[in-house]
Image: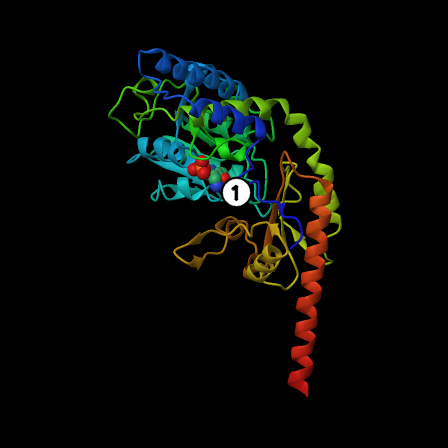
Amino acid sequence: MSKHIYLDYNATAPIRPEVADAVNHAMKQPHNASSVHRFGQEGRKLVEDARIKVAALVNAPPAQVIFNSGATEGNNTVLQHFKGERVLVSAIEHPSILEAAPNAEQIPVTKDGLVDLGALEKLLQAEPKPALVSMMMVNNETGAIQPIRNVSNLCKKYGALVHCDGVQAAGKIPIDITELGADFLTLSSHKIGGPQGVGALVLGLCGITPTLLSGGGQEKSARAGTENVAGIAGFGAAAELAVKDLPGYQKLESLRSRLESKLPKGTIIHSSDSPRVAGTSMFSLPGDSSETLLMALDLEGIAISNGSACSSGTIKPSHILQAMGVSDKETASVLRVSMGWDTKEADIDGFLKALGKIMNRIEETKRKEKSAAHA
Ligand code: PMP
């Protein structure tokens, strides 16, 4: 097998070496950040240093950052708080929003995968007025950047609070929670080269602190449970590097152009007319099933995704593409390439070479089957 090529950063990014060092260092001592002894104090320092770095990632005051186990928890925390009230969510949210708020009304998106602002305004005007609107900043499948400022302006006009899932935006585009007009923002460490199982809920200035877990006084009683000190330290290190490397991330745009310009004729690139983050490309290839391609690519040492969720052994078509009105045929042949801090031109070329080889092989098999049927 050739060298492995990893192009699935939107699922999880490889941990940065500096982050692994920070996690290792923090794990060497028994740090309970609530203990009064010196080990506890060292743990507290690691947590508070990380809080400053994560706050800087979204330009928030550090006191507004609540550490938790990741964005699934952050999203559930916010949505659960508004249970029983009228809530609007975009149709392309992550399942940790959609399933946490099954009664929420969905805001449609355009065929380019951007929130339909006209439809949002109509939903905001209807009575009773919505208490919360949840809209992601960047879509995890297409990479489309949503017009959050426009969304929050509309929400303010009609008195709704705004929750923004910032998971796929962090480290890819600048985030300023105040400028966005977000009241709640969720982040996840493992999408920016940090460890898994740690994230943050960042509070805006609305003065509400949604709380899911109670039982301990950690995080000023906003999130009970012994702090994941090593994970938080790693998240802090990853956040610092993500801020520094923001210009570096933009360079991936040239790799994406290289990729998209060399895809087979007839390939449809989703959200290509929308503003997109530099390192994500989602496309439907003419004809071939993405399941077949993914498996064949994996055998060639290439890790990408098809953007569909796999649960209890059943492959569900992407609800995001369905919301964009993409046909079943195109949805069935979709692939997502997502790049990040360690992606090189050779990775894209390696992917294209393997894809070409696999598609030729499939064509050849089809030709043989066809001629056998006619024989
Ligand atoms: N929101 C979005 C947009 C995501 O892409 C993900 C991760 N797939 C999550 C939320 C959930 O994050 P976590 O893995 O930290 O629970």
In the image as oriented, which residue stretches furthest toward the front? 28
Task: State which quarter of the image contains the C terminus.
Answer: bottom right
Q: Quick check: 357 above or below 114? A: below
For numbered disc 1, what is the local secondary structure?
loop
* Residue at x 34% of width, y 36% of height: 86
State whether label 1 is within 8 Å of ligand 1.
yes
Q: Is residue 184 visible?
A: no
Task: State which quarter of the image contains the N terminus.
Answer: bottom right
x and y percent of residue 143 in the render? 59, 40
In the foreground, 361 or 371: 361
Q: Quadrant of residue 224?
A: top left
x and y percent of residue 291 in the render? 55, 60
- What kind of residue is marked 1? Ala
Q: Quadrant of residue 47?
A: top left
Neighbourhood count class around disc 1 (C-alpha, 10 Å): few under 14, some 14–19, many 20 upward: some
In the image: residue 57, left or right of residue 32: right
Q: Quick check: 34 above or below 238? A: above
Counting the numbered discs, the total is 1
In the image as oriented, which residue stretches furthest toward the left? 215
**Residue position marked by numbered label 1 in the rendering:** 11
Q: Quick check: 12 above or below 292? A: above
* Residue at x 58% of width, y 57% of height: 294
In the image: residue 201, left or right of residue 11: left
In the image as oriented, which residue stretches furthest toward the bottom? 375
x and y percent of residue 81 in the render? 31, 30
Q: Is residue 359 visible?
A: yes
